[in-house]
Image (cartoon, rainbow, N blue to C red):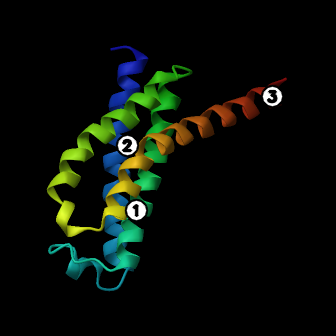
Amino acid sequence: MGRGLVGVVAGLIAWVGFATVANLALRTLMPGYAETEPAMEFTIAMMIGRLLVGAASSVVAGSVAAWIARGRGWVPAMVGVFLIAMFIPVHVGLWDRFPVWYHLAFLISLLPLALLGAKLVASRRGIAAARQR
């Protein structure tokens, strides 16, 4: 497998892994979260917490994909596109459980935040390269 494909797969795995760990942290740190999670009857603060987990997961996914792909700019973009494709059916199924702003904030942010993660890796590489000069 080429670096591009490995980067896409690794980015998606990173998203799931980071989101899982961060969600466990929400369950532990946010009062009432673990009890309301099965019924998905979240408060606004809990929904914002979930959106922040998704946002951070997207940045991590884009960073991992970019780090592995080494300059193949399409790789983090594909991670974002795949995340959108994976989560549209999930959010369609959950449409009545959450307000529209929640769905839109989550889905619209996936691609830009994956690209932001890639940009962070690129800027870090640029800084490292400048230091070596």
Q: Amino acid at mark 3?
A: Ala
Around disc 3, counting alpha carbons within 10 Å, would you say few (fewer than 14), some (14 to 19), or many (20 or more)?
Answer: few
Q: What element does badge 3 sit on? A: helix
Extreme-bottom residue of the structure: 31
Query: With 125 as the anchor, is 18 left or right in this view?
Result: left
Extreme-right residue of the structure: 133
- The quarter of the picture where the N terminus appears is top left
Identified at 33% across, 64% down, the residue is 23
Q: Amino acid at mark 1?
A: Leu
Q: CA distance from mark 2 to mark 1?
A: 17 Å
Tell me which label, 3 or 1, sits earlier in the chain: 1
Query: With 95 as the anchor, is 130 left or right in this view?
Result: right
Is 49 drawn above or below residue 13 in the view shown? below
For disc 3, the marked residue is: 130
Identified at 40% across, 62% down, the residue is 51
Identified at 34% across, 85% down, the residue is 31
